[in-house]
Amino acid sequence: MKIFTRLAALSTVALVTACSETPDDSRLQEKVIRGFYQQHLKAHNPGIPGADELKQLQPFLSPMLFALLSKASDAEARYRAAATDGVPPPLVNGDLFTSLFEGATSFSLDSCESENNRASCTVRFRYRASSSDAKDDSDESWRDKLLLVRQNQQWLIDDIEFIGNSQSAQTEYLTDTLNSIVNDYQ
């Protein structure tokens, strides 16, 4: 009888240990998404981030996405330096990391689906114009998907799928936008 009790106890411990991996992944995924968007909303800079903002965002980004953002930032700098008629418009107008041109004023994680070392996380965004801007009483809500990759036991943002709504400024993946900029302004 003692053997059955011990086997039951070991089975319970094994089951609890196996099930606890998912909540850990969920917390780590939420942590990276929350950190990324808190930093981005704090800076609230439109367009391609400069070197200082990139440095702040780097801990949340996969090496591939960080390298691509760095190349796009360098392309923007070359583009501006080559301009002969004053200050040219930015290569990307509006918010680069959400579907809405104005960006978001708040966000929350909806859900994540993980498989092996990849995850797809739906994030709910909201843009609410400040009350000081009497002309703009916008209140927009939408969802985008963040694609995460696990590297060295850490979840990192690898791409963003812009799902948005009918007001969306972007209709593809962040990496598509960045690759286009890098290729057009080498």
Image: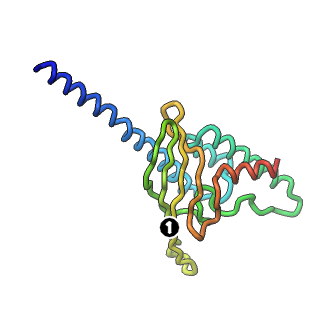
Q: Element at badge 1?
A: strand
Q: Position of residue 137 (x, y in %)?
A: 53, 78
Residue found at x 10% / y 20%: 1
| Corner quadrant of residue 16 | top left
Q: Is residue 33 above or below residue 106?
A: above
Using a 10 Å C-alpha cutoff, classify the residue at mark 1 as few (fewer than 14 neighbours), some (14 to 19) or many (20 or more). some
Residue found at x 51% / y 60%: 143
Apparent side of residue 121 relative to residue 45 in the rendered image (left or right): left
Identified by mark 1, the residue type is Ser
| Corner quadrant of residue 28 | top left
Q: Position of residue 53 (x, y in %)?
A: 62, 49
Residue placed farthest to the top in the image? 3
Residue found at x 58% / y 46%: 57
Frontmost residue, 131 versus 93: 93
Q: Position of residue 144 (x, y in %)?
A: 54, 57
The residue singled out by tag 1 in the image is 141
Q: Position of residue 130 (x, y in %)?
A: 51, 72
Frontmost residue, 118 versus 159: 118
Residue found at x 59% / y 51%: 160
